[in-house]
Image (cartoon, helix red, strand yellow):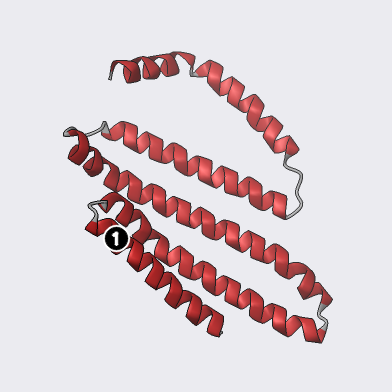
């Protein structure tokens, strides 16, 4: 229990220092990202504290089943917290990036492009973390990866014209 309290205090202090340092040096975009990481870090610290408490209780009682489940549960939990933190970073980036670009370049980026990149990034985060969770749970992901490769080729051929126009517009921009 003390691990959770101490870890929360250290996380709050460390992230608070990073946010204040970023704000003082004019890095508001970085400060916003650090600020969004505080809650997932605290949740991860408390998950680790609960893991160590369960481990401390299960070891002397020789609860073999619980001792076998705990490492897998911890890995899945940490992966889900990482996914949550990544999605929070994507959300704050989507909101703060246009203001950041306006401050540095003087013009706003295309809002549809920012929205599309945010959606693509969210899909990639969820897909990658989902595959990692399946791998931790000992599911074979080879067939899913093969299906994804075939589906990617099919979508690539179907969207060939759209992709060419998109890259042409990016080159002109």
Q: Residue drawn 53% across and 67% down?
A: 44
Q: Residue drawn 16% across and 34% down?
A: 106
Task: Find numbered disc 1 in the image and state the secondary structure of the residue it sits on.
Answer: helix
Residue 47, image x, y percentages: 57, 71
How many residues crowd around disc 1 within 10 Å: few (fewer than 14), some, or many (20 or more)? some
For the N terminus, the quadrant is: bottom right
Q: Residue drawn 40% across and 51% down?
A: 89
Q: Is residue 65 above or below residue 148?
A: below
Residue 39, image x, y percentages: 42, 66
Residue 105, image x, y percentages: 20, 33
For the C terminus, the quadrant is: top left
Residue 57 figure quarter: bottom right
Q: Count the labels in the image.
A: 1
- According to the picture, the residue beneath numbered tag 1 turns out to be 21
Residue 102, image x, y percentages: 19, 38
**Extreme residue toward the left, this view:** 106
Q: Residue drawn 55% across and 16% down?
A: 157
Question: Would residue 51 be found to the left or right of residue 12 on screen?
Answer: right
């Amino acid at each position: 229990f003390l691990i959770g309290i101490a870890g929360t205090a250290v996380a709050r202090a460390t992230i608070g220092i990073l946010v204040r340092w970023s704000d003082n040096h004019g890095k508001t975009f970085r400060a916003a990202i650090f600020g969004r990481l505080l809650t997932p870090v605290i949740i991860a610290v408390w998950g680790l504290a609960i893991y160590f408490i369960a481990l401390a209780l299960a070891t002397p009682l020789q609860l073999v089943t619980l001792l076998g489940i705990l490492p897998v549960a911890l890995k899945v939990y940490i992966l889900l917290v990482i996914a949550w933190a990544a999605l929070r970073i994507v959300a704050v980036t989507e909101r703060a990036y246009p203001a950041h670009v306006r401050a540095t370049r003087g013009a706003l980026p295309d809002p549809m492009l920012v929205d599309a990149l945010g959606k693509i990034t969210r899909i990639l985060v969820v897909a990658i973390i989902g595959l990692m969770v399946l791998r931790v749970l000992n599911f074979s992901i080879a067939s899913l990866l093969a299906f994804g490769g075939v589906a990617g080729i099919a979508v690539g051929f179907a969207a060939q014209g759209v992709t060419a126009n998109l890259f042409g517009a990016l080159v002109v921009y």
